[in-house]
Image (cartoon, rainbow, N blue to C red):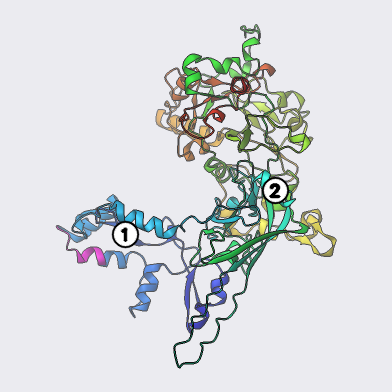
Amino acid sequence: ELQKKVPDVIRLGYYEDETSALSRWNLPASHFLESWGDALSSEGHYLAIQPMILPLFGGFSELDLLNAVMGKPKVDGPELVQETFQASKPSGDPATAWSKFLHDGFASHILLRDQPPAFNGNTAGGIAHNLWSPPGPAPTPESPEVVLVRDYSIDDGRYINNAWLQEMPDPITKLTWDNAALISPRYAKTLGVETGDLIKITVNDVVPVTPPPAEGKPAPPPPPPSMPRELEIAVLISPGHADNSITIPLGYGRASLNSVGEHSGFNGYLLRTASNPHYIVADGKAIASIAVKKVGRKYPLSITQDHFSIEGRGLVREATLEHYREDNEFVKKIAGDDELPPQLPSIYRHPPLQSAQQWGMTIDLNTCTGCSACVIACQAENNVPVVGKLEVAHGRAMHWLRIDRYFASEHGYDQDKGELPEDPEMVHEPMMCQHCENAPCETVCPVNATIHSEDGLNVMAYNRCVGTRYCANNCPFKVRRFNFFDYNQRPVGKKKIAGALNVYKEYFAPFTEKGAPDTIKLSKNPNVTVRMRGVMEKCTFCVQRIEEAKIAVHIRAGASADDLRIPRDSFTTACAQACPNEAIVFGDIRDPESKVSKMKLQDRNYRLLQYLNVNTRVSYLARIRNPNPKMPDAQKIGIASPNEKEEAKE
């Protein structure tokens, strides 16, 4: 509203959006990876920001715009940064000093701040107090609280045009391409709603009281009535959510984007004000009332996982620290693993497994937070396509790596009867191709498209695959993905419903436009095959990185070497590289000194569905929890494993 009152607005941005529509001049911004810039460290040292590539579409950086506003001629490259650097009068030859500055990334001789900023706890506490509204009265079913939060994927809306992030399942709700009003199962029963039902949230502000007129003066006019703020939004029932509370992620419901994020989700900003930016409760001071009612319509939500329970299968294994100290081999007593017959040496040789180096992986559930950085890293590394909201709803998401999320309840629940857990414990488990040595998928493929490599990988020969999908049916871990359409040739921005027929445009593929923009092509990894319609795909342990490491060793050794080994822990997969907690470890399992071999020797190590005798190359380290006994519901922590749940009941 305030921007409309400014006659001339110049906007520097990446995309056309709502702000662009209100601006007189729109300048294309160059990406920060395309721009020169500078900055100060916390200690006051001068830093250099250097571009990785030249701007693809020209554009202006922040320095370019400020330079133009000051009336200076436009310059290209690092001249503006170099001008600031030379003004500091570096010692020695200016050209040499400049080269060293670019090489190091900072100038140690330049200190533009006398003293580093000191942390002031009182000031920080005051800022935090001002950012968050003081707690009001306890919410009730008739007057709930509304909490506005940044979305996990797209933040406050700035990444809404990033299709990778839009299609990344939320770590808790597993929702894609939308936001929703998150409520607890108990509050959902009170409202009489289910997941996907639309509700209307109405927030009424307190009408300010008109002060009495001064003696001898006319009464002031009454304040204009405030319009209630309303939002229609779909419900998503989230076990573990607080009762009588509604959480709404921000950043969705935007228009005028003309891209992948247009008309996705609901605009939570309609309920937000400057005085209540995060927390809305009927306190009688600013907010008079909050009303929620069922609209009576449905909204389709694309959720990648709607089954919550482990069903006693021992997929995720955990224990409390106390129990782990009493029995450090508890993982072997879950899901019947301790009753399996011993695995004796086979009299048959496995020809593909005779290579000197054999690759494997461990995933530490103790350090995995379910952040999904590995999911995006895998998608970027392996040219995994985006399929769009409708295809995700059909169960056709193409992610090679998924993060399974389970809820464990102290009292148990039967989801088939519509029961949902109240106040459950939540656990995450990354799931990708387990690269079984006795792979069930290989035995059913009629064209030998999925085979074993010499170093123990279960790999795909894409040009052999005819799309029978027998392998996906026979995979006990459900990690194979099938290209029902040519997703890589038709970007998600073009996937719309075909007119009044309400039919997906991909069904008319021969008659629709084909081909990806050049910018999409530039995002592809040239070392990985781009798959097409009718082809099955899955995790390959980043085989392209393995081959790249082999080639590098061959180049260094020359043609005379016979037995070439990749140096220990010299490379890793994309998911392991992206994991901020190093929960994923990849390496040579035949090298006893490799990190992955040492991880597999821990007493917390276990393999999934071991009774199938598929001998997975991926193993997991059980999660150990250490709840404070004084913490509420401490007895509910560490009960995801079947044996732990039984002990909790006793």
- Residue at position x 41%, y 67% in the image: 61
Q: Give, as a single range, the part of the protein colored magenta.
A: 84-91
Coordinates of residue 644 in the picture (x, y in percent): 59, 22
Q: Compared with residue 505, is residue 9 higher up or lower down, i.e. above or below?
A: below
Confirm whether residue 590 shows in the render.
no
Viewer-nearest of labels 2 and 1? 2
2 and 1 marks in contact (CB < 8 Å) = no
Judging by the rendered image, the residue that carries numbered circle 2 is: 188
2 or 1: tag closer to the N-terminus: 1
Distance (Cα) linking label 2 and label 1: 49 Å
Q: Quadrant of the C terminus?
A: top right
Callout 1: SS: strand
Quick one: label 1, few (<14), some, or many (20+) residues within 10 Å?
few
Instruction: Give amino acid for label 1.
Output: Ala
Residue 282 at x, y = what percent? Answer: 57, 61
Q: Secondary structure at mark 2?
A: helix
Give the residue at mark 1: 39
